[in-house]
Image: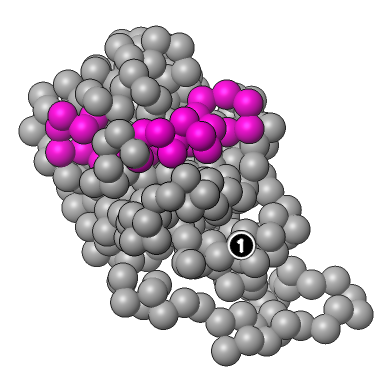
């Protein structure tokens, strides 16, 4: 079964991860721009990061047969850093129109400060201007309030529900999202947030409409195979192949196809691998390795 990981930070992962993901059936992914674990000190580092998501990382994924898309934004945490916040908002229009950018994100709330409110609103307007969907991160602390406020601000801006993916849901926030027309993402983590069994229970209770799962794997303790592992657990629990495919493939594809920058047919066909290729003269291979070439 083909699978899609719609929220994974591959820049922080290794080529072993790409190999394992590809072998487990992950054919496409979305890498949202996010917080690097320490504050950036100037806007130039954002620009290089955006360029890497659109360039080198996309190439690296292709070398393992994985289609790479990204979302770009000022992340909620750094919305609170005046050294970079306004400059990133000014920078974004230069990149949001580029091929491979399938949403504005991840935006949302971290501490729910006035600065976060302001940049959330400004980035909703950027999404509207560029005809892009929104990927919304919900906070770790006070998640319910953060989810309610995220939905409320999208409504205040009259941004269409069907273009909003509210991410990192749990048992408490999912019903709030499903009441709207927004899509509901779930991050399956090794120790916190959702795990595979809790996700199975949610699919059994609420069905598959607008339901999405991801690994949210990054530089922290996380597992880039959580989408295939959740699919396997759904199968063991008796959920039909069609319903599993809806959650791990059809739904994320349909959501991000709304960007107009992801062709469903093309992604369905899958990508070959040609490790003889280079990106600006650089290869993922080291000397002496035989390039994999697969149609
Ligand atoms: Zn993330």
In the visual, does 22 lie left or right of 176?
right
Report the residue at 33% width, 55% height from top. 243
> Which secondary structure, mark 1?
loop
Q: Position of residue 244 (x, y in %)?
A: 39, 55
Q: Which residue is mark 1?
A: 24
In the visual, does 192 lie left or right of 258?
right
Quarter of the figure with residue 19: bottom right
Quarter of the image with the C terminus is bottom right
Please state which of residues 46 and 287 is positioned toward the viewer in this rendering: 287
Count of numbered circles on the image:
1
Residue 54 highlighted magenta (yes or no):
no
Report the residue at 79% width, 72% height from top. 285
Report the residue at 38% width, 16% height from top. 143
Residue extent of the magenta highlight: 177-203
Quarter of the figure with residue 21: bottom right
Q: Position of residue 218 (x, y in %)?
A: 61, 39
Q: Position of residue 135 (x, y in %)?
A: 34, 40
Mark 1 surroundings within 10 Å by alpha-carbon count, few (fewer than 14), some (14 through 19), many (20 or more)? some
In the visual, does 183 lie left or right of 19?
left
Please state which of residues 112 and 3 is positioned toward the viewer in this rendering: 3
Residue 136 against residue 57 in the figure, above or below: above
Q: Position of residue 238 (x, y in %)?
A: 43, 50
Report the residue at 63% width, 32% height from top. 190
Quarter of the figure with residue 211: top left
Tell me the colour scheme of the image.
one colour
Is residue 58 visible to us here?
no
In the visual, does 161 lie left or right of 294?
left
Is residue 38 visible to us here?
yes
Residue 93 against residue 171 in the figure, above or below: below
């Amino acid at each position: 079964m083909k699978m899609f990981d719609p929220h994974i930070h591959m820049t922080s992962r290794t080529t072993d991860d790409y190999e394992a993901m590809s072998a487990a059936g992950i054919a496409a992914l979305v890498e949202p721009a996010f917080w690097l674990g320490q504050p950036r000190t100037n806007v130039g580092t954002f620009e290089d990061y955006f360029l890497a998501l659109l360039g080198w990382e996309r190439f690296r994924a292709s070398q393992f047969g994985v289609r790479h898309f990204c979302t770009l934004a000022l992340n909620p945490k750094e919305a609170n850093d005046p050294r970079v916040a306004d400059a990133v908002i000014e920078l974004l229009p230069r990149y949001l129109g580029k091929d491979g950018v399938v949403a504005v994100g991840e935006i949302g709330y971290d501490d729910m400060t006035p600065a976060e409110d302001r940049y959330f609103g400004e980035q909703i307007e950027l999404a509207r201007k560029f005809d892009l969907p929104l990927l919304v991160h919900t906070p770790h602390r006070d998640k319910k309030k953060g989810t309610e406020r995220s939905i409320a601000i999208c409504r205040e801006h009259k941004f269409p529900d069907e273009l909003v993916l509210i991410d990192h849901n749990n048992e408490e926030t999912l019903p709030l999202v499903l009441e709207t027309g927004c899509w509901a993402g779930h991050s399956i983590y090794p120790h916190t947030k959702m795990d595979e069994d809790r996700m199975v229970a949610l699919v059994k209770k609420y069905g598959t409409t607008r339901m999405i799962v991801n690994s949210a794997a990054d530089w922290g303790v996380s597992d880039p195979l959580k989408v295939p592992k959740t699919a396997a657990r759904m199968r063991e629990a008796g959920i039909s192949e069609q319903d599993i495919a809806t959650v791990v493939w059809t739904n994320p594809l349909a959501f991000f196809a709304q960007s107009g920058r992801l062709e469903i047919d093309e992604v369905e066909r899958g990508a070959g691998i040609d490790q003889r290729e280079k990106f600006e003269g650089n290869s993922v291979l080291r000397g002496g390795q035989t390039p994999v070439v697969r149609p």
